Image (tube, coloured by chain):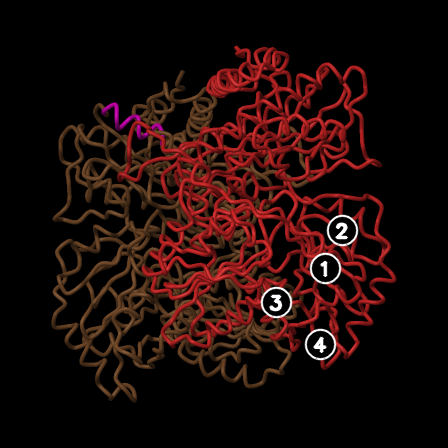
Chain colours: A red, B brown
Amino acid sequence: MGSRTNKGMSPKITGELLRQLRHAMRNCKYFSEPIQAYIVPSGDAHQSEYIAPCDCRREFISGFNGSAGTAIITEQHAVMWTDGRYFLQASQQMDNNWTLMKMGLKETPSQEDWLISVLPENSRVGVDPWIIAADQWKTMSKALSSAGHSLVALQDNLIDVVWIDRPERPSKQLRTLGLEYTGISWHDKITALRAKMTERKITWFVATALDEIAWLFNLRGADIEYNPVFFAYSIVGMNSIRLFVDLKRLQIPAVKEHLQLDSPSKPELNIQTFPYESVYTELQAVCAALSPKDKVWICDKASCALTQVIPKSNRSPIPYTPLCLAKAVKNETEIQGMKVAHIKDAVALCELFAWLEKEIPKSTVTEISCAEKAEEFRSQQKDFIGLSFPTISGVGPNGAIIHYRPLPETNRTLTMNEVYLIDSGAQYIDGTTDVTRTMHFGTPSAFEKECFTYVLKGHIAVSAAIFPNGTKGHLLDSFARAALWESGLDYLHGTGHGVGCFLNVHEGPCGISYKTFADEPLEAGMIVSDEPGYYQEGSFGIRLENVVLVVAAKPKYNYRNRGSLTFEPLTLVPIQVKMMNTELLTQRERDWVNDYHRKCREVVGAELERQGRKQALDWLIRETQPIV
Amino acid sequence: MGSRTNKGMSPKITGELLRQLRHAMRNCKYFSEPIQAYIVPSGDAHQSEYIAPCDCRREFISGFNGSAGTAIITEQHAVMWTDGRYFLQASQQMDNNWTLMKMGLKETPSQEDWLISVLPENSRVGVDPWIIAADQWKTMSKALSSAGHSLVALQDNLIDVVWIDRPERPSKQLRTLGLEYTGISWHDKITALRAKMTERKITWFVATALDEIAWLFNLRGADIEYNPVFFAYSIVGMNSIRLFVDLKRLQIPAVKEHLQLDSPSKPELNIQTFPYESVYTELQAVCAALSPKDKVWICDKASCALTQVIPKSNRSPIPYTPLCLAKAVKNETEIQGMKVAHIKDAVALCELFAWLEKEIPKSTVTEISCAEKAEEFRSQQKDFIGLSFPTISGVGPNGAIIHYRPLPETNRTLTMNEVYLIDSGAQYIDGTTDVTRTMHFGTPSAFEKECFTYVLKGHIAVSAAIFPNGTKGHLLDSFARAALWESGLDYLHGTGHGVGCFLNVHEGPCGISYKTFADEPLEAGMIVSDEPGYYQEGSFGIRLENVVLVVAAKPKYNYRNRGSLTFEPLTLVPIQVKMMNTELLTQRERDWVNDYHRKCREVVGAELERQGRKQALDWLIRETQPIV
């Protein structure tokens, strides 16, 4: 799990800002005619999930800073669409100028339907074409046109017009990654990309997703908190590699050498560098030279602005780029790195939990201080870079807020009377982690144990599932829910997401969710999370999350030679037995728990021993006693 | 299960027919310019799954008569696309003029991609606009246009041009259904439809699906084998009901009275009748009188011809019509009727199986004679109308052909050494049945028992599943496969389909499949099949199918007051214990089997007793002994 979350729980006062924005909407300095509505999506020009402060426009205008949400402002209304994870948070962060649209509820209109219901005839609806994805533009534009309105691309972002003290776009130092971390050189990645282009008769590929560009060039940045990426674009042809990035960043000798800027090994591996902002004009130049048969690959989630530079007849939009697919299947070096990162991460968490056991009775540990302590323990591990998302640290009722992040005004003390949920992860140079554990340091109630056990059963059902090669992750989602459903319970989020290797903690194109039907089939080497939960509003929250690796399985038979897959947990942190009602577990589930704990003890125990962390080792040994 | 299947296993000789068709494709009598390809879809003008002999154009030209398949003929090629159920059958029924395209395999091109790869520049691709659905037309037309070709609607069907002895369109006598069978009068169905139209601001609704029209008017026909429907269209407005049907059929006094043709109870319930063929001109007349704001509902699967009569600005295409949705949720009367029909059906099957046990040792029973005997026993039951699909009756290797239908040249004798699969069902005036049982009359092998038990586990996992209100059926599909997957096995068909009430054995909009993402959420009163299987090619086939009713479940908790659902089996035919490896079953699965068998014994036993069918009753009692 992990998302941008609640920075402040008191609503932002937005009356004056909205007045200014509406003035700009009517102001003909920015365009020929006034617009009747303005759409403010969440993202940046790369459709990133996590964004830099300069791109937090939706948060700036509304106060709501969840990871997903779209604001629409008309003369009369200011309306926010967000999903079930953020209903509570959004309603707390936004003032009375705003109306919340709860996505996923039957009665909630789509943005298109709502706009059509409130707009006067022949309205113009504005949006920044760099921020809206091409596929969203298409849907929205079509719906508005069919009702007599029009969607208009405004070159000036109207939020920026009213955002006086908007921060600068970050440009932090780049880090080069050698073969010992990446397993494949950027040369070979370019060559593999070109082979796929040749196979599909594609002449150019436009890369816009920041993690894909970082992966392709074996570079990392620090422009966006938690995500080791940097602002860039790339355009790759059969004999050309163009990289668009703040050129100052390439002056560092290590980077220069890594990219062979001064001495390319082969002409076709010569990287031409351009300023970040010139991607638009360079893509125009590339497109001006296209022949009618040339095809250009661009992700259908890339910005409308860049997509529309490519003539429609040359454009070949794809739901997932070849980089996204290649990046998702980790190579042996990356898998090894991810394993090492998860062992280090487990060491830090064993330390944390051993420390908590001693400290909680003193009533000195809070949600915030516990999150800080977790970061402190992690930072002691080799190659630690930072967190992979803001730590979710919730006691009692706060644990039921799915993307809760503790704040001074909500901060609760950890006690022996309440359930504690901690969802946290880190970036190490060798890998990215994301783990959730739910603990009780006193005596959990029968209901808490019951719910925990159903969640555990769901976690195991996914983790131990064997399924044919080519199965899409969404077909496994119900396995995680079956035990909860049987008792009339459920959780309102997906079960798993792809995880990058020293990259974004959320990545496509695979996942495990009832919602995602566009996911790509799971294959060996992919890495996803397995994280069912249960949330009892006002009382407690439970989530159990491991990061798991897709591996070949060898069942008894092999129908049609398709081969089978299963998951191997990379996360090796004990699951609290005290929270389990072991009578509700089947023998196979008990065996799974015991096998998992044995592996935790062996692998993480050896590392704790090596690091001389005696107290954590004692805790680990106690917490991994077999259940009977 | 149930589909059109293999009538003849020797291929049809198609050289001369294809020569004539290609001549027609070049022949300017039928259109202004020659066409380079001609598409022959499966369906009729109502996009029916089962079709009348006069509509079997794809079968006529190719010999392949499976329920799904599309033929495309070019000057050089004759190509057939069909899915995994029919790979074997299609390859046996088509001669060397034809190439089989196996849908679902990665390397198989789509029809569009294939056409684009073989067509000369600026080609014209012809299709009968009555036979192709509007959504398919759109996809195909778009793909062809983008490659410089065009899709052309040909008024003359070119197959009909070369089909000298094409049969007449059937026009069998209509049957009226009273409230005791339907629960709701057609007047009330019209009123409910109009309420939905008002709610969505729709002025007209065009009904084109035969089962929806039969359901709406509480009429049944016999124009299509196995499906009690009749050729008709209907156009419903707020003050107008137009029924398009061979007018001779309305001369019968009972039908006249049922439809109140001479004395409508209210003016707005006056049915205007028109000849079947005049739907096109009448819809043109309706559309000519539309105001710009008027909206017309038509299913996006309706024919391209009829859809395009409606001006695009007035057209409101929907994936499922309100009739389809209303028909899927059975009322109390229909549920009661379905239960009664399933008890009668179980009586017939108990008789069959008891009879088989005695006859098989004599080696006199074949796949065909067994299917006939099943029909004979069914025909002895009250209100029997006919079969609901061609009986699938397969011994040993024939059972592994998913939609096998026995033929004289493939007919095998039932023995004590092979597994026997029978998938059959009937139409009774009170309901429709569809049941599959797999039996062994000697001693099954350990592998046969193992596979049977995995299939049974899957069947139970779906049947006993508890899930939240609003869950779509496709989220349950993996439950049916988990046990097979765990051993590396699987089956290449969906798990369940909607079942009509004295209507089509396959109906939308709900189902249980990994493929269907457009299914509507399950709700109480819906009826679907639950039919996992396993097919060991060349050896045996296993399938276990019950028809199940969606009912409210009352688990311990009720998260967010959403309510829960589960299934109640309507099919009450024992599942052969001899085929089970009971050691592989959990205690809960054993309990399910025992509970199910107890219910079979109580309910069907009482009816067998009432009907004085002693031998079958003895068989039932023996076959429903509890397992321990």
Spot occupied by residue A91 in the image (x, y as percentages of width and height): 79, 48
The chain ID associated with circle 1 is A
Q: Left or right: where does residue A405 sit relative to residue B490?
A: right
| Residue at the disc numbered 3 | A140
Is residue B251 in sight in this rendering? no
Mark before the other along the chain sequence, 4 or 2: 2
The reply to whether discs 4 and 3 touch (Cβ–Cβ < 8 Å) is no
Q: Nearer the viewer, residue B605 or A206?
A: A206
Q: Nearer the viewer, residue B83 or B210?
A: B83
- Examine the rendered structure and indicate whether residue A264 appears above or below residue A286: above
Determine whether the residue tagged by mark 3 lies in a helix, strand or loop: helix
What type is the residue that disc 2 sits on? Phe
| Residue at the disc numbered 4 | A123
Spot occupied by residue A481 in the image (x, y as percentages of width and height): 55, 35
| Residue at the disc numbered 2 | A64
Instruction: Give the distance between the C-alpha atoms of the residues marked 4 and 2, in whole angstroms.
Output: 27 Å
- Examine the rendered structure and indicate whether residue A560 appears above or below residue A614: below
At label 3, counting other C-alpha atoms closer than 10 Å, the crowd grade (few under 14, some 14-19, many 20 or more) is some
Is residue A613 in sight in this rendering? yes
What type is the residue that disc 3 sits on? Met
Q: In the rendering, which numbered label is found on residue B361?
A: none
Spot occupied by residue B457 in the image (x, y as percentages of width and height): 40, 30
| Residue at the disc numbered 1 | A71
Q: Nearer the viewer, residue A327 or B206?
A: A327
The chain ID associated with circle 3 is A
Determine whether the residue tagged by mark 4 lies in a helix, strand or loop: loop
What is the magenta range?
A: B445-454
Same subunit, labels 1 and 3: the answer reads yes
What type is the residue that disc 4 sits on? Ser
Instruction: Give the distance between the C-alpha atoms of the residues marked 1 and 4, in whole angstroms.
Output: 18 Å
